[in-house]
Amino acid sequence: MQTKRTFILGAAATLATPMLTRAQEAPDRNASSFVTQKWQDHFQSLGNGAILADITSRALHYWAPDGSYRLYPSSVPMTEALTRRGYSQIVRKRVGPTWTPTAAMRQRDPSLPQMMDAGPGNPLGTHAMYLDWPAYLIHGTHDTRKIGRQSSSGCIGLYNDHIAELFSVVQVGTQVRLL
């Protein structure tokens, strides 16, 4: 004969088992699964720095010209169709960026504004670094739920404090690879 306590513990364990199994099988979808990278695997030299945006692990790696290293969790494009991969570079930087949705974004969501000034509602966050590919940026976000997820229309997003830190050390001309 089971005691009330044994019954309750047994029932709790039975109910928790499927949740524990699912947690072990599928990692948190809002957490980056960082994969260690070496700049030498992606760039000929460090030059004035290098940025690797790893779409699969949802992480942005930065190597300064002196070889020092920083790693940031990031948001990545929602779909493979929105993802661009290859080599680029930072061509412009802006504090308090304005946002102009692309034609494709407006087609998907006609309610989007023509343009949005800097501020709390702006999806580019507090800082933006523009790549030499039109409409592709590395930028901040006010919506912290997006970090670690497939949530962008092609850009790489960072927490606002992380983009501010990166912005302060990255130079225009820094090489970038989206992998």
Image: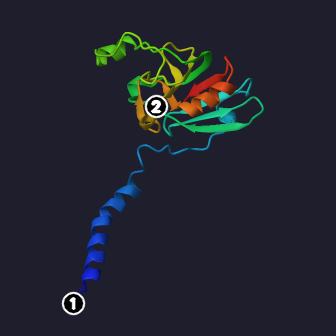
Instruction: Pick the residue in front: 122 or 91.
Output: 122
Q: Residue at x 41, y 58 (%)?
A: 24
Going from N to C along the chain, the mark reached first, 1 or 2, is 1
Label 1, secondary structure: give it.
loop
Question: Residue 128's image quarter?
Answer: top right
Query: What number is the disc on residue 76?
Result: 2
Question: Residue 39's image quarter?
Answer: top right
Q: Give coordinates of residue 113: x percent, y percent.
A: 35, 13
Q: Give coordinates of residue 68: x percent, y percent.
A: 73, 37
Question: Residue 115 vs residue 66: left or right?
Answer: left
Instruction: Pick the residue in front: 56 or 113.
Output: 113
Name the residue at the bottom extreme.
1
Name the residue at the right extreme.
66
Instruction: Pick the residue in front: 2 or 153.
Output: 2
Instruction: Pick the residue in front: 160 or 130.
Output: 160
Q: Are marks 1 and 2 in contact (CB under 8 Å)?
A: no
Mark 1 belongs to which amino acid? Answer: Met
Q: Residue at x 49, y 34 (%)?
A: 55
